[in-house]
Image (spheres, helix red, strand yellow):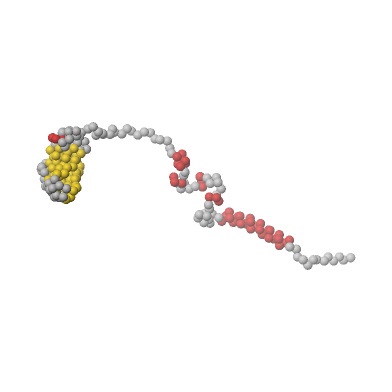
Amino acid sequence: MTVVTARSGRRSSSAPAFAVAVLALVVAFAGGAFAATKIDGKTIKKGTVASKQVKNGSLTGTDVKDGSIAKADLDGATVAALQGPAGPAGPQGPAGTSMLGQTIPSGTTVSGGFGISGYNAGPAGTVHTTYVELPLPTQQEINDIEIVSAPGSGYANPDAACSGSRLAPTAPAGKVCLYSGWGFQFGTVTGSQLSNPMSPTYHFKIRVEASTANAQFGVEGVWAYTAP
């Protein structure tokens, strides 16, 4: 007897699904192999890999370029830990020189500036006074110091021994020389010793006559003193 088997007209759907699954496996394996062989530093766009994409503790010293980490990249504790031990003490330096309690050394020239200005509320010839303090006491009493002026300065008591200038003032030993700077509406400029007996070796006075009544006046200059 002949047996005839009838086939259904419906096509099986298992074959296409199986093919898709196989294709997915191929892509998965092939894609991983592609990434492993094709992705490198040139493929990754600069600035796209953040800290969260890097596994903690995965980077080592071999991953960091030598000399690429600066002090500013380290925290304070790390910088402190890198500090080495203190080195040996250096040699003792020379002793300093203190001028406290001393006088101006013999042959030493000291110099400075002076000035006085203001309004002369009195008549012409009214005297105005300013005080000059020496940097150190003198070896001689200030009353023994002659206060003179440079020739051509227009000040009183000109002395040819005052051979310096306002830019390079000099004085002979035992004298104070006055050098003029600028001034207006003034008359005689005279240096004199300080009359205060409590400080005879520190100060001297400069007296300026105003040349105009009820007007502004002013004088500026430099002085020099050489200890004998």
Q: State whether residue 51 is above or below residue 201.
A: below
Q: Is residue 181 visible?
A: no
In-image side of 82 versus 193 (left or right): right
* Residue nearer the viewer, 111 or 184: 184
* Residue nearer the viewer, 191 or 89: 191
Indicate the position of residue 116 as horizontal and vertical percent values: 19, 45
Indicate the position of residue 147 as horizontal and vertical percent values: 13, 40
Q: Is residue 59 visible?
A: yes
* Residue at the image position 12 percent from the left and 46 percent from the top: 125
Total count of labels: 0
* Residue at the image position 15 percent from the left and 37 percent from the top: 193
* Residue nearer the viewer, 147 or 79: 147
In-image side of 66 versus 108 (left or right): right
Q: Quadrant of the C terminus?
A: top left
Indicate the position of residue 78 as horizontal and vertical percent values: 47, 41
Q: Quadrant of the N terminus?
A: bottom right
In-image side of 45 versus 126 (left or right): right
* Residue at the image position 50 percent from the left and 54 percent from the top: 47
* Residue at the image position 23 percent from the left and 32 percent from the top: 101
Residue occupying the far right of the picture? 1
